[in-house]
Image (cartoon, rainbow, N blue to C red):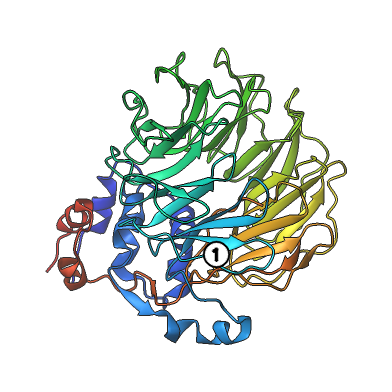
Amino acid sequence: MKFNAEQTLKNRETFITWKKLVHYCHSMIEAAIPHLYLSSLPLFTQEDEKLAIAFTGILSIPSEKVFTAKQEMKGILYGHENDVNSAAFSPDGSRIVSASDDKTVCIWDAQTGTQIGQPLTGHDGRVLSAAFSPDGSRIVSTSGDNTVRIWDAQTGTQIGQPLTGHDSSVLSAAFSPDGSRIVSASSDNTVRIWDAQTGTQIGQSLTGHDNWVRSAAFSPDGSRIVSASDDNTVRIWNAQTGTQIGQPLTGHNDWVRSAAFSPDGSRIVSASDDNTIRIWDAQTGTQIGQPLTGHDDWVRSAAFSPDGSRIVSASGDCTVRIWDAQTGTQIGQPLTGHDSWVHSAAFSPDGSRIVSASGDRTVCIWDAQTGTQIGQSLTGHDNWVLSTAFSPDGSKIVSASTDHTAHIWDAQNASDTNSSLINHTNSMQSQAGSTSIQSQQLRSTNEAAHPLHITMSAISSANGVDTNVSNFFNSFQFS
């Protein structure tokens, strides 16, 4: 079989480096045998990152044949049947909500690690994120089925009809501070605002981005929305009218992974694959000072401290860094200790500690004043840890991993709590809450979908695969 792959790749709009390929496909690569063949080729370009979603489920391996040994060792609680993409604490810290590629949402008791009720079903595609409302009474979830759904957090029943309107996967959603509205970000390049009570869309779609919108969040007073996009820009929107405020915030020269308001709403911090962090005036949209430089790889996340005086960033250069939010200068030395990419970092509620999650399979806790590591690295995950966060009271930490589990750790004693939330069988990509008080692991049960040898016969027999798949392969010269 011959094909002109070089010419095909030259014709693509954007070329993603091999590092990005490995980043997006690491769970597939680690789960598959070395011969990836054509399964990796369509993932080269920014335009076709969505093919990673399209290919999921084309070929699969029964998880009982892959994870039996781990299940016997870990005492897994079955429930989810595929990757866990996010996990977050409720506002009072008593529950955790998880979102999975098995098309379900699960609610867990944060103390015991037991699943509360049945999985929340209804989505027809991967559930990419799930979060509680500010009062903890509702849950919002987003999916590859292009919808947003609202659930009763006590009963697990869906509230009303799905929120429809997006034309592609909905990557994230968040409640407004008062819980009355929801904002969603989608790979259809738009942001939408919804009435959280009725589920109806408020106004028109917020258009302007010309690439995927990765995240969208309300300002602390709920009057504005900030969005971050693969078009290298950050945008600010009027949350009442949906109109864009000022010009796009430009300066980054690669994808903007995240953007967030400061606690007082006066500034915005953004993190980008261009290795920099930038601070912006939330009123004028102008950049404050110079870019925060020092990282020599992608900046995966950036967040303000609770008092807004500092910023913490996590990077693919294996470090965490702390910055003065007023001057933009780095505070102290880089926080070193991880041996692989740091995927996320977050302050504790009182701002005294920082927790980080890494591809080296560990979670680390740091003194936010001195930058020194507190205790030993928290071990227990057996694959990349993608996200981590403190509980609202700072007593626990939740971490999510591509080992198909989530762990809950005792943040005071830096230890595992010995209880496992295990229902999901694929990677967990985001968390909201390190010793594990109750090492709760969420793992799936039935089939773990891994694109292995994606041959032409497999593609031709697949249903509902993105048309870009066929377009991509049609460009090859087969003989």
Percent across and percent down for residue 112 are 67, 68
Q: Residue at x 62, y 85 (%)?
A: 73
Q: Position of residue 170 (x, y in %)?
A: 37, 44
Relative vertical location of residue 382 with respect to residue 54 in this rendering, above or below: below
What amino acid does circle 1 point to?
Ile
Does the rendering let one see residue 378? no
**Going by the picture, which residue comes out furthest to the left?**
479
Nearer the observer, 30 or 89: 89
Pointer 1: what residue? 116
Q: Residue at x 78, y 54 (%)?
A: 395
Q: Residues within 10 Å of mark 1 (few under 14, many from 20)?
A: some
Tell me the quarter of the picture where residue 13 sits.
Answer: top left
Q: Residue 447: which quarter of the image?
A: bottom left
Is residue 462 left or right of 445 when viewed as pictured?
A: left
Provide the secondary structure element on which disc 1 rests: loop
Q: Is residue 338 left or right of residue 151?
A: right
**In the displayed structure, does residue 316 sit left or right of residue 320?**
left
Give whichever of 202, 257 is nearer the camera: 202
- Give coordinates of residue 174: x percent, y percent: 50, 38
| Along the line of sight, the residue nearer the viewer: 369 or 428 | 428
Q: Quadrant of the N terminus?
A: bottom left
Answer above or below: position of 69 versus 312.
below
Extreme residue toward the front, this view: 155
